[in-house]
Image (cartoon, rainbow, N blue to C red):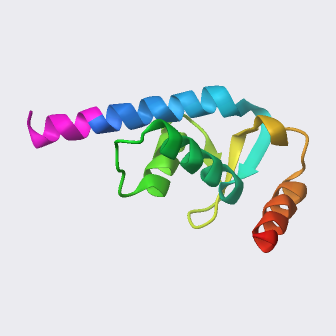
Amino acid sequence: MSQRAIHQHVQQEFSEIVDRFINRYCRVGNGLSISDKTLFPVFRAFWMATATEIQHPALLGQFRVELAQRGFRSNGPKRPRWYGLTLHGLTMLSPQADTQLIDASSESA
């Protein structure tokens, strides 16, 4: 198998894992948003549990690319807030509560 074919296979598998993550853990719709700081750690844990044999050198960057390719918008390159989706458990939280939740959990760690 050529390097290009291997890369395409890994990329396709990554894309499928992102689809499964969104379908299982996210609510999609207008008026929803979530910070990258909240969303990515949940995806990373899902990735580690799902893709135990696959290493991905640029997991955060590729995750952001996959979200953008699916039509989700963000408000900045460094620490974006994603619009059009949220985690199921955070559907009722405001953007401020979302940020406070993460800040509080990182302080207790």
Q: Residue 43 at x, y = what percent?
A: 58, 45
Residue at 75% of width from left, 69% of height from top?
A: 106
- Residue 15 is situated, as x and y percent measured from the top left of the image, at 43, 34
Q: Which image quadrant for residue 38?
A: bottom right
Residue at the image position 57 percent from the left and 36 percent from the top: 71
Using the image, determine if residue 22 lies above or below residue 73. above
Image-based side of 94 in relation to 81, left or right = right
Residue 14 falls in which quadrant of the image?
Answer: top left
Residue 22, compared with residue 102, is above or below; it is: above
Q: As drawn, which residue projects farthest toward the left?
A: 2
Q: Is residue 51 left or right of residue 70?
A: left
In magenta stretch: residue 5: yes
Query: Residue 8 colored magenta?
Result: yes
Q: In this picture, which residue range is highlighted in magenta?
A: 1-9
Compared across the picture, whether 16 is left or right of 3 comes to right
In the image, what residue occupies the spot 79% across and 39% down? 32
Tell which of 66 and 46 is nearer to you: 46
